[in-house]
Image (cartoon, grey):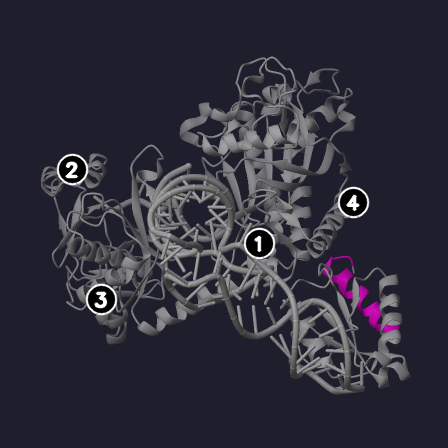
Amino acid sequence: MQITLPDGSTRALPDGATGRDLAQDISAGLARAALAVEVDGEVHDLDRPLPDGATVAILTWESEGGKAAFWHSSAHLMAEALEALYPGVKLGIGPSIDTGFYYDVDLSETDHPVLSADDLPAIEKKMIELARTDSAFERRDVPKAEAVAHFEAKGDPYKLELLEGLEDGQITFYTQGGFTDLCRGPHIASTKPIKAVKLLSLAGAYWRGDESRPQLTRIYGVSFPKQKMLEEHLERLELAKQRDHRKLGRELELFMFSDKVGPGLPIWLPKGARLRETLVDFLKEEQVKRGYEPVVTPHIGRLELYRTSGHYPYYSDSQFPPMFEKGAASGSAGLGTEAEGVSEGAELANSGDGAEGAAPTLGGDEQGYLLKPMNCPHHTQVYAHKPHSYRDLPVRLAEFGTVYRYEQSGELGGLTRVRGFTQDDAHIFCTPEQVKDEFKNVIDLTLTVLKALAFEDFTAQVSLRDPANTEKYIGEPAQWDGAEQAIREAAAEMGLETVEEEGEAAFYGPKLDFMVKDALGRSWQLGTVQLDYNLPERFDLTYIDENDQRVRPVMIHRAPFGSLERFVGVMLEHTGGNLPLWLAPTQVKVLPITDDQDDYARSVADDLKGAGLRVEVDTRSEKVGRKIRDAEVEKVPVMLILGKNEAEAGTVSVRRHGLGDDSDQGASEVPALRQGLLDEIARQLGRA
RNA sequence: GCCAACGUAGCUCAGGGGUAGAGCAGCUCACUCGUAAUGAGCAGGUCGUCGGUUCAAAUCCGACCGUUGGCUCCA
């Protein structure tokens, strides 16, 4: 038979040859490294016969598919170890993931129902012991009835439930050693290559991700073909922790949290506020250039506003409970408008079944106020305050609006998931024909912002309707087709590469999201551009078209940063806290060598401050070495070292963060330095 | 919210049934110094909160508060 390799070349093999035979045919080294094969795009076991005419790639540890097979096999190995250590354990699912593998297990009927981190080393040990037996992973087709009988005998309800969703004739078992699992595969050939295992963490995980189902114990782990690779992996995890924005935020004194203020409510310290304001100023300028008009709206709004928008009470479990006016008819829970009443409401929500239990009532006519969970309802009122002509459109209303959402306590984390945050929000009201140009305008803005921050590894995702389920979306199908096409074209014309995801659109419109990964590899959504057919309808927004007809505008929600909090968090992790000059809270630190130079240092600082730079002078009674070290630790981009020579010559000696001593000792003139820094900032902002 | 771990000085962490310890940071003094930590002294904590066990609790138990990882990667 003929097999095509990824490079297009072909090879003739005897009928019934397997992936292993192919690897062997290419080279003995490849055969040793081979973990699995990719046959016409699908990953298979090494020892399955290859179909004639297939395109086949040999997968090693270096490929994603190879790693996936390795880790998936490691999950089975862990399951085998668990069965050996904890007889009676029931197994959920155990896939490979991007960073290793996990298995969800139910230990409730074993003699060790609660697993703790202390138990993990024993499981690792057992896994290694089992791996050394060099047991083959054997695949077997199993009739459904036999599979059901197998798991009934074993008493495993989870596997039985999984079987319900599978067709007879498509069911396979894999066995290694004394362990057999329902599994589609693929697997590596044997347990032998699994040389190093580390079980990393334990977590509760609801069966099938459903809170109403039993909670299983999820064990996360990672494994490698060499001990050294595991050590390197653990080192990388340690290094990633150094870049954690929570650690950097504390060390650089950017932000904090206070138990007294409340969980998930970040407090910006002076240096963090400088950073934040710099970001805001930059974006405000870019927005003005692009035709946005700033507006300012209150932090609360009547419940009626949110009933009209549809956010209340529909999303009430993700909102802080409403405030009711004193003496209002509904005061059954005794909530007043005073601060005490409000915080008590929040506590109620915390101990109850979400805010629904906490809200005094959810009656349809309650008068009261809601802390705003988004800015759009307010902005519709700005648009609605006067009639609009098609000649006015698009109307672009921008506000750095602080919003509050009652995230579940377990969801909170650093600056990436908080309960109070500021969106760089804007709402564009336009005609359907303008949608494409508006998307282009927003993409341009977003790319400008990401470029100024040297963000390169982000992905842009276009979220489309689920074509199989069109009735759950509001608006005309033709409108959707047009809009989805407009987004695609806008992205293409702006040179933005996108991935498309069907079924990820909101019910009210398609969207374009910008996603990035944090230091630990978790994915976060930052910027977003969302089309909305819903709110203009609900608020009865209109404009008069050229035929003197009242028609609906299209609304676009957009936030290039998403939230300032999350954006700063992710940016700190990307830069490791080494912020670009334009953004650093302290841009320049002046370091006089002895106090004889203090006055000169202050005069240099004043000169630079006059040009708008953020400058500090270190006049402590310390040696320069110490002053430099502290400035380096604070990650100040520019240090100016001033001694007797500089003071006499009227020059400065420049040291850049992270670069050590530079060669121009004492050689820079202050005006040239000042201009150089200003030019550098302009370049970073794309304004050179 | 649920599962697991954690919570000791501003930070990093040690200790552990007999009422607390280090380094750094801070303050004072001396030192006036040329590219990543000058020295000495001083001060700083009701060991997250509340309750229980005990002659005695930071230590053991419970509840609560908070932090962290996970609960969306589908045999």
Q: Please state which of the two labelled residues, at mark 4 or mark 1, is closer to the viewer.
A: 1
Q: Please state which of the two labelled residues, at mark 2 or mark 1, is closer to the viewer.
A: 1
Q: How many labels does the image show?
A: 4
Most common secondary structure along the magenta stretch: helix
How far from the left and from the top, in percent, is residue A544? 74, 19
Chain letter of the residue beneath label 2 in the structure image: A
Q: Which amino acid does label 1 sit on?
A: Val
Q: What's the distance in space between the residues labelled 4 and 1, CA to CA?
A: 26 Å
Residue segment shown in magenta: A670-687
Determine whether A91 is above or below B27 in the image.
Answer: above
Residue at 69% x, 25% y: name it.
Answer: A380
Q: What's the distance in space between the residues labelled 2 and 4, CA to CA?
A: 63 Å
Q: What's the distance in space between the residues labelled 2 and 1, CA to CA?
A: 47 Å
Q: What element carries label 3?
A: helix
- Of marks 2 and 1, which one's residue comes earlier in the chain? 2
| Discs 2, 1 touching: Cβ within 8 Å | no
Question: Dot 1 corresponds to which residue?
Answer: A570
Q: Is residue A416 left or right of residue A200?
A: right
Residue at 57% x, 49% y: name it.
Answer: A415
Q: What residue type is labelled 4?
A: Lys
Residue A168: assigned label:
2
Q: Is mark 2 on a helix, strand or loop?
A: loop
Q: Is mark 4 on a helix, strand or loop?
A: helix
- Of marks 2 and 3, which one's residue comes earlier in the chain? 3
How far from the left and from the top, in percent, is residue A422? 65, 42
Chain letter of the residue beneath label 1 in the structure image: A
Question: Dot 4 corresponds to which residue?
Answer: A289
Q: Please state which of the two labelled residues, at mark 2 or mark 3, is closer to the viewer.
A: 3
Q: A33 and A325: which one is in front? A: A325
Q: Is residue A114 left or right of residue A340?
A: left
Question: Dot 3 corresponds to which residue?
Answer: A128
- Of marks 4 and 1, which one's residue comes earlier in the chain? 4
